[in-house]
Image (tube, rainbow, N blue to C red):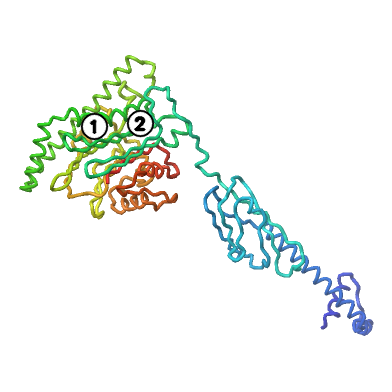
Amino acid sequence: MNDTKLYIQNLFAVKKIAIGQNRQQLFEDFIKKEDNEQIVKTIIEQQNYLMDKWELKNRVADIIAQQLTIPNATVGKLYKFKIDFEQLNLTDLIHVECFGLEEMGLAFNKNESIIEGIPNQNGELSFKLLFKIINEAEDSIPNEKIIPIVINADPKTLWKDIPSNRAAPFWKKDDIIASGKLGDKKIVVASKRGRSHENVGSFRDDDFSFKLIEEIGWSAIAVADGAGSYPLSREGSRLACIAVIDYFEKHLEKETLEDFEHKIFEQQKSNGEDLLNEIKVLSKQILYKAVLFSHQQIKNLAEQIEVSSPELFNNPKAKNALDYFHTTLIFTLFKKFDFGYVVMTFGVGDCPIAIVNKEQTETTLLNWLDVGEFGGGTRFVTQADIFHSQEHPMASRFNFKIMADFSYLFLMSDGIYDPKFVVEANLEKHERWLEFLKDLQGENEENVKVDFSYENKEIADQLSTWMDFWSPGNHDDRTLAIVF
């Protein structure tokens, strides 16, 4: 049965036109007429054309309605996203371009189907995807699909930098840097107020101090992190650090130190284990007196201020005046001898001390951290109970080490440790310290480098700049001391 006959039969059936037996030959003659065949052919062609037009319109509508989600971008951060047309079942697109990306700082790479660039504005924005599909006329107007894109603001720009109140008691600089020589080693230190403090105009609670005590030949370095929830902790951290230096410089008994060094020489000659144990005990006794001195200095100040300025003591969390000055404290005392370096350390709180050997094949963590099982377990040198704790004996807070040489000695507050090492266990991993060194030497997102060459006079500024690194959720004060 030919198309003409079938079409007319279906048409008559729809119109309820019956063809009787006596009209069959007449119907056959009717459909064979050339003009009728042409009419049917034309009708079918027009119907197919109409159907094709509908299919095109329907497909375009589907594409416009199809969800196309692209990842969020961030102002100032390189953005690159490939639109996978095959995965999106959009292989019938024959012409694609994007309009409106340029004003956002982005562009569309047609060859690779990639949106890329560095966004320059933030907000819930959108751009147009202009497209044509197969069978659409070349001169037809492109179809438009609106694609939303969220560009987040640079988080750094959302933070305020409100200066701390210079008129407040115990005001100190928001940021401070220092560098110098400690015998044949050099030291660089930077301490920066955290973004969370800048945002509200509060104070830098971290502090540090260091000195080569030439009369005895020992170098002392201290770092402290004041407890931000206690209003005078900034002075507690400052006083804790300078008290350590003050003790070793002015209050350490020379006879005790001379006896200590004599025993070290003897032990190096004899290599006696018993003598080494005796030396370690003496080391703890020497450092313990510095800790006790620091605690007492802060306590004396707290009692004086409570009398002279009672209005400052209104924090319900504090049990006594000393609590207002709560601070962690870590310090190291080291000296070079003919056989190598003697390094002694103390730590209370969550600030680590670590030393890297000369060959950079091993890193030793020189203290354990008071971090608590779920965080918030930090202890302070201002807490009297640390001196007689059974759970964490004071003796366990000291360390003694002899080594031929070292490449780096680090003391840092948790503002560095938290973002760079994340968890305490990573401090025990040498490879993480190597990564940390590479970070310092420029392998970081900001490409900021600290040059540890001895001739570098800008090293303190470089370290301070490096410490501006961005780490989501880590906006505490940052203090880092490096001996190299």
Query: Measured from the top left, where is residue 165 in percent x and y?
Result: 44, 25
The kind of secondary structure element at disc 1 is helix
Residue extending furthest toward the left? 270
Query: Measured from the top left, where is residue 278 in percent x and y?
Result: 9, 39
> Mark number for residue 245?
1
Query: Measured from the top left, where is residue 369 in percent x and y?
Result: 28, 40
Q: Residue at x 36, y 51 (%)?
A: 441
The kind of secondary structure element at disc 2 is loop
Rendered view: 108 above or below 37? above
Q: Residue at x 35, y 34 (%)?
A: 206
Query: Measured from the top left, where is residue 414 in percent x and y?
Result: 35, 40
Residue 372 appears in view: no
- Residue denoted by label 2: 227
Residue 413 falls in which quadrant of the image?
top left
Q: Residue at x 55, y 44 (%)?
A: 153
Amino acid at pointer 1:
Ile
390 sits to left or right of 460: left
Q: Which of 316 and 181 is in front in this view?
A: 181
Quarter of the N terminus within the rendering: bottom right
